Amino acid sequence: MATCAAASQAVWSYKGKQQWKLVLLPIFLILVHLIPVNPVREDGLNPKSRKRIMPDLLTEPPAIDPVYEAHVYCNVPTIAERSMEGHAPHYFKLVSVQVLIRHGDRYPLYAIPKTKRPDIDCMLVPSRKPSHPQLEAFIKHMSKGSAAQMDGSLSSLPHFPSHSLCEMGELTQTGVVQHLRNGQLLREIYINKHKLLPGDWTAKQLYLETTGKSRTLQSALALLYTFLPDFDWKKINMRHQWSTIFCSGSCDCPMRNHYLEEEQRRQYSLRVKNNDLEKIYVDMARIVGIPTRQLRASNPIDSLLCYFCHNVSFPCTKAGCINMEHFKVIKRHQLKDERERQEKKLYFLYALLATHPLLNQTVSRLQRIAEGKKEELFVLYSAHDVTLSPVLSALGITEARFPRFAARLVFELWQDGKRPKEHFIRILYNGADVTFQTSFCKDHYKRSSKPMCPLEKFVNFVKRDMFLIFNSTSYYDACHRRAL
């Protein structure tokens, strides 16, 4: 029991591509074989939750294809990405950008028992694909980072991956390249086009925060390097966030934990009803020669996704090979789980309470800038799938797939040049404008000719409307009011 709970808890801090447009990988995979829910960590997190994304009508197959979804999730850098960031009427001025990213491609956190680990090289080699024109310069610059201010344990983490055989959870070269591309894209839009930061920008104009994992720190540095090439390390102050939901000093929320536990029970109930899924696990366990229960606890999909994303054959033993059919059945169950999750709303209730501290910080910063403050104009949070997924759910972006590797969620703040006191926001997910998919701005879209949402609508949502479903008027009250 303790082993499974530990395995389940570890998953919560990691999981989680679009080359066409965004991805899905639902919750169920993190469920191990326990019937009771696992103990909730101090930050309220426990390993479950997954989400979808907006379809691309030009490239997406007419029916949901689990293999296609897996390719999107991998997000292997191959083609130039289309992006809607930075689009606004010519008389609008961009005054702030806040970016929440998921770390890039990583090595699995789990190994399938009695099989050879996938042979992935985590040394950065500019001549090896996928690569980036700035990869070599990035490596050199990361070696000079002793002058940076790194909070707490961040100072002991390496600035880039460097093992010939990846360590568990380590960022890969693919993951580095994904965020070098993200940073380059954002630089072309926000720095070169909109002049968000001056050439002599200062440390006070940046706000950088990451969880204490090497993969999130390294992802942040990769994006930052191409966003602000050859930046002065003395201007970098990287803050450490201990919670994967970035709740900081507002993590005490019993009802958040309650809704998460209820969601976990729903997931388990759905899984045990799936006979095809059970047969697949039994067959996979037979192949590797372990009890079915132990195979589930090892979370095989995490490892299988690494094989899939890196085009490595699935593992074999003397008893046979794990194959694509095994993979497809698990993925199909994820899709079914996602549909039911949307209907039951338990995850949505969890998401509202889990993300309020982060969204409240975001709103407060936007308000300060709208009032004329010139600090923290560019914000970067480097996080996990379990950070992005509840934020998307809380905002009401129900068509968003589960966060792919190197996913990005962007909040833009714009000032109306004709009415300087009026400010508007745009929200973009992996380059797609999802502003009017949010629950607080759907109706405004019907009445406005402007391609953005009034800032006050976002403020009212975070400060007041998020709590209405709980029959509460504050975060504290919603967190401590027992469910009816």
Image (cartoon, grey):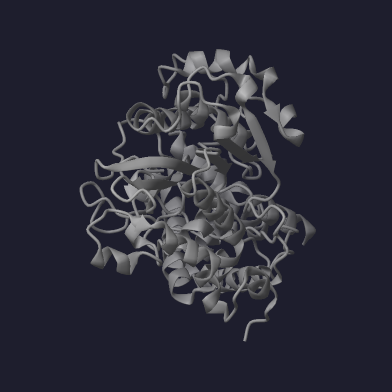
| Residue 312 to residue 445: above or below | above
From where the camera sits, is residue 197 visible? yes
Q: Name the residue nearer the viewer: 134 or 335.
A: 134
Q: Name the residue nearer the viewer: 137 or 272.
A: 137
Q: Quadrant location of the N terminus?
A: bottom right
388 left or right of 22? right
Q: Quadrant location of the C terminus?
A: bottom right
Instruction: Write the residue at 70% across / 30% down.
Output: 150
Residue 19 pos. (x, y %): 34, 39
Residue 107 pos. (x, y %): 57, 36
Q: Name the residue nearer the viewer: 166 or 370.
A: 370
Instruction: Write the residue at 32% across / 51% down.
Output: 419
Total numbered labels placed on residues in the image:
0
Q: Name the residue nearer the viewer: 253 or 258.
A: 253
| Residue 410 to residue 231: above or below | below
Instruction: Write the residue at 54% across / 62% down.
Output: 28
Quarter-wise, where is residue 142 in the image?
top right
